[in-house]
Image (tube, rainbow, N blue to C red):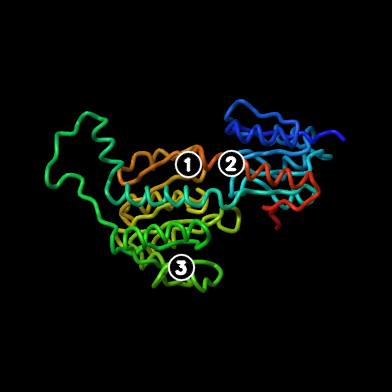
Amino acid sequence: MARPTLLITRPLPQPVFQAAQEVCDVIMCPENLPFSEDAIAMALVEHDAILPTLGDRLTRAAFDAARRPKCRLIANFGVGFNHIDIAAAEARGISVTNTPGAVTDATADIAMTLILMTARRAGEGERLVRSGQWGGWHPTQLLGRHIGGKTLGIVGMGRIGRAVARRAYFGFGMKIVFFNRSSVQDCGIPGAQQVDRLELLFAQSDFISVNVPGGAENRHLISADILRAARPGSILVNTARGDVIDEQALIEALETNMLSGAGLDVYEHEPQVPTALRRLENVVLLPHLGTNSLAVRTQMGLMAVDNIRAFFSGQKPPNLIRT
């Protein structure tokens, strides 16, 4: 029996490539360029499986253009899958998997990095030093804020939300409130309180960390109305997906001091970052570093390969996504 063919859309760590070769005949693209709808449509026709990632356009139009796809599995590299039209894939008999769990701690670390950098104005300080204009220490320079004892609002108390909450509570003594669409009986944080409306969370929180999946259900979950409910002086951090926040409304909230700052690792139209955001000094901007460590990226890739191995062995993949 011929081995299945697998297309990997971006360069991945060598251990991932080697593991994939044990299961499939593999083509791994040498460039870090997102696949267009046309390129995805062609790949769907030519390969038994595709291992894509964020930015690759697996849209309904791409599936429609493929017509009679050869592909039977899309093994997404990443936990988020809002770049994949899951319903369109299922309609053509194509299974879709992702890599949850592997990204949890790394993403939570970046969330805390953004909270600390924004609160202590580290981005402004770094830019000041690099500009050559720093004149030395003085008592009132770049005065920031402590996070100890402050209230952190968690939007989405899933794996990553809980990991952020643990770091904030046990590491910095922050108080935790959270919003989650379903009831959470025990999030593992003493004294944590669940609120049933986002407006209440924003009104009570000194810092807000966004940790929900992307996709249509959560697009612009953080709207202009929600931002207007924010406690004066609060800071918003997003390590989820850029379109969870109405980016234009966020810019206006920062420009009018409804928020005192923001820390962003993701953007609504990534990799495009609005000029207005880049000009604001009270914003920390990172280039989607949430899972950027060799260990995590290798683990994610190996998890994707495990899904592929199970699928082509006639077993249910461990991380199968269903609508």
3 or 2: tag closer to the N-terminus: 2
Which mark is nearer the camera, 1 or 3? 3
**Residue 188 - label:** 3
Q: Which residue is drawn at 81% across and 34% down?
A: 3
Q: Do the residues labelled 1 and 3 touch (CB within 8 Å)?
A: no
Amino acid type assigned to the residue bearing label 3 in the image: Gly
Q: Do the residues labelled 1 and 2 touch (CB within 8 Å)?
A: yes
Quadrant assignment for the N terminus: top right
Could you tell me how far apart the alpha carbons at marks 1 and 3 are, in whole angstroms?
A: 28 Å
Could you tell me how far apart the alpha carbons at marks 3 and 2 are, in whole angstroms?
A: 31 Å
Could you tell me how far apart the alpha carbons at marks 1 and 2 are, in whole angstroms?
A: 11 Å
- Which residue position is annotated with label 2? 54
Amino acid type assigned to the residue bearing label 1 in the image: His
Q: Residue at x 72, y 42 (%)?
A: 61
Instruction: Name the residue nearer the viewer: 79 or 293.
Output: 293
Image coords of residue 35 (percent x, y): 64, 34
Q: Are marks 3 and 2 in contact (CB under 8 Å)?
A: no
Quadrant assignment for the C terminus: bottom right
Amino acid type assigned to the residue bearing label 2 in the image: Leu
- Which residue position is annotated with label 1? 288
Indicate the secondary structure of the residue bearing disc 2.
loop
Q: Residue at x 40, y 52 (%)?
A: 237
Indicate the secondary structure of the residue bearing disc 1.
loop
**Which quadrant of the structure image shows residue 226?**
bottom left
Relative to 51, 113 lies left or right: left
